Amino acid sequence: MIEIPEAFARSTVEREGEPGAAWLAELPRTVDELLTRWTCEPDGEVMHGGVGVIVPVRRRTGGAAVLKVSFPHPGNVHEPDAFAAWGGRGAVLLHERDDERFAMLLERACTSTLAEVDDGDEVVAIAGRISRRLAVPAPRGLPRLREQADAWEEELRKDAGELRHTLPRHVLDAAVATIRELGRVQPDILIHGDLHARNILRADREPWLAVDPKGYVGDPAYDGGTLLKSRALTLLEADDLRKVVHRTVDIFAEAAEVDRERARRWAQFHAVQAAFWGRRHGFRVARGGARLDWLTEFADRLAELLAEGS
């Protein structure tokens, strides 16, 4: 049976409590049963992400793959649907799936990610091209981003009223306008939904392949917002932050072949969300103290710069 990484077990119990502990107790048996059913053998050290383990395997019919088993969560339900719709176009191939166990047998990519590329402009351009390839007509049954618009606006207004912040009124108004003007009417296009450099891996079949999609349906420019939010820490030492932020939007929009203003507006909306999220929950890299204050202020600054337009 596999050995569950200690850090993954600890974080799962901290986040999920007793249900997480019960799931972990069954996880080695679950993996063994899936390996038998899909005629695979372990072929490397067990890895993990935030919510699942990844077991490198060798298929007895030939070829390397990975077995991914995730903790059951609504956010993971449509991951295999997205992979199935793409069929390997810009993303890893789906070989097998067990939806009840939140398990998939996937094409194996490399462990190095796009985040390891030093050239920031290249990172954004590659991510934009991946986003363009993933933007295909959506199958039925996947979650529509437009269905989240009312909740987005309600949450934003609640945060603005309850949390201490320094965001100017026009910055908040810009985010609300994006929800109302872009959020409630969106195309039936499949998008990644959580596009960032760590979710794009080097590969053999293609130079880069996406992993860990949410399987959302909506505006492809939305992915530009998730990407820029994830790039925030790389912008901290920029000499001219405004110039770098707007260049990032320009590069993504051109590579993804989306409207530049839509990409900017979604990025501004994500920055406002991040500013409030940090104040209410903290960030992964800072849960409190002076560093958290500094990061929330930086998110404020991004939201203001992106509200300016081109």
Image (spheres, rainbow, N blue to C red):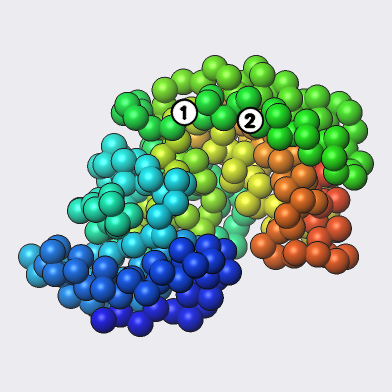
Please tell me how crowded label 2 is: few (under 14), some (14-19), or many (20+) other residues with Cα within 10 Å: few
Q: Earlier along the polypeptide chain: callout 2 or callout 1?
A: 1
Q: Quadrant of residue 54?
A: bottom left
Q: Which mark is residue 144?
A: 1
Viewer-closest of 191 and 238: 191
Tell me the quarter of the image containing the N terminus. bottom left
Where is residue 124? Give x, y as percent.
57, 47
- How many marks on residues? 2
Front-most of residues 193 and 122: 193
The residue positioned 75% from the left and 65% from the top of the image is 286
Residue at the left extreme of this rendering: 61
* Residue drawn at the location 22% of the way across and 73% of the way down: 32
Dividing the image into 4 quarters, which one contains the C terminus?
top right
Left or right relative to 184: residue 114: left
Q: Is residue 49 visible?
A: no
Judge left or right: residue 23 versus residue 226. left
Q: Is residue 29 left or right of residue 114?
A: left
Q: Is residue 32 above or below residue 197?
A: below
Mark carried by residue 109? none
Apparent side of residue 62 relative to residue 289 in the rendered image (left or right): left
Where in the figure is residue 281, as x and y percent of width and height? 73, 55
Q: For marks 2 and 1, give the CA distance.
A: 13 Å
Residue at 20% x, 65% y is 34
User: Mark 2: which secondary structure?
Assistant: helix
Q: Is residue 4 visible?
A: yes
Residue marked by disc 2: 151
Q: Amino acid at mark 2?
A: Ala
- Foreground mark, 2 or 1, reads 2
- The location of residue 38, given as percent across then percent down, is 14, 63
Q: Classify 140 as above or below 128.
A: above
